[in-house]
Image: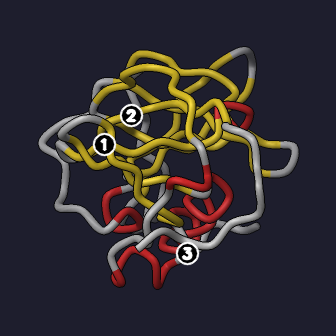
Amino acid sequence: MTAPTDAAPATEMLLFRASGELFALALRAAIEVVEMPALEAVPDMAEGMLGVFAIRGSYVPVFAPEVALGVSPASGHAAVLMLRRGARAVGIALEDVEDVIMVDASRLHHPHAAAAGRGVVVGVERRGGDLVGIVDADALVDACVARTGEPE
């Protein structure tokens, strides 16, 4: 069943892989993607936070997104997708970044109930033989940060 939407134009989305599953989020939410840097642990890191890395004079916290996305833990991360959180950047560790795709909101299907309950995966699109979970970037960051108790 297709999710009800207003007649919205297609949106540019960044296609990425987490735990072998495909997801996409609005390209405009992304600051940049970097190869997985060496991460430094911080005192009292909570579950889900992998560490921090320095880039252009600032430290960026990096989080594992698997719990928020409703997928099994990743066997490894090759890239960090930097997203905005207010005036700060937050890193999301990914298996890979695949491509930029166009997604038509009118073609989205309802997501699996577990992922939808978190508000992170807001729809699913079929691309050839693959299913792509459409992610709300703000909800993903909020879900990752909330697991660590990091201040808003």
Where disc 1 sits, the SS reads: strand
Whole-number angstrom distance, CA of label 1 to CA of label 3: 17 Å
Sequence order check, earlier mark of 1 and 3: 1
**Lateral position of residue 75 relative to residue 148, left or right:** left
Q: Which residue carries the number 1 mark?
A: 22
Image quarter where the N terminus lies is bottom left
Residue 133 occupies quadrant: bottom left
Residue 16, labelled with which disc? Answer: 2
* Foreground residue among 124 and 28: 124
| Residue at left offset 68%, top offset 66% | 5
| Residue at left offset 53%, top offset 21% | 33
| Residue at left offset 41%, top offset 67% | 68
Residue 18 occupies quadrant: top left
Sequence order check, earlier mark of 2 and 1: 2
Whole-number angstrom distance, CA of label 3 to CA of label 2: 18 Å
Q: Are marks 2 and 1 in contact (CB under 8 Å)?
A: yes
Where disc 3 sits, the SS reads: loop
Q: Residues within 10 Å of mark 2 (few under 14, many from 20)?
A: many
In the displayed structure, 38 sits above or below 21; it is: above
* Foreground residue among 40 and 86: 86
Where disc 2 sits, the SS reads: strand
Label 3 sits on what residue type?
A: Gly
Residue 101, position as x, y percentages in the image: 51, 26
In the displayed structure, 130 sits above or below 113; it is: above
Looking at the picture, the colour scheme in use is secondary structure
Label 2 sits on what residue type?
A: Phe
Residue 99, position as x, y percentages in the image: 43, 20
Q: Residues within 10 Å of mark 3 (few under 14, many from 20)?
A: some
Residue 36, position as x, y percentages in the image: 37, 23
Q: Which residue carries the number 3 mark?
A: 119
**Lateral position of residue 21 relative to residue 141, left or right:** left
Label 1 sits on what residue type?
A: Leu
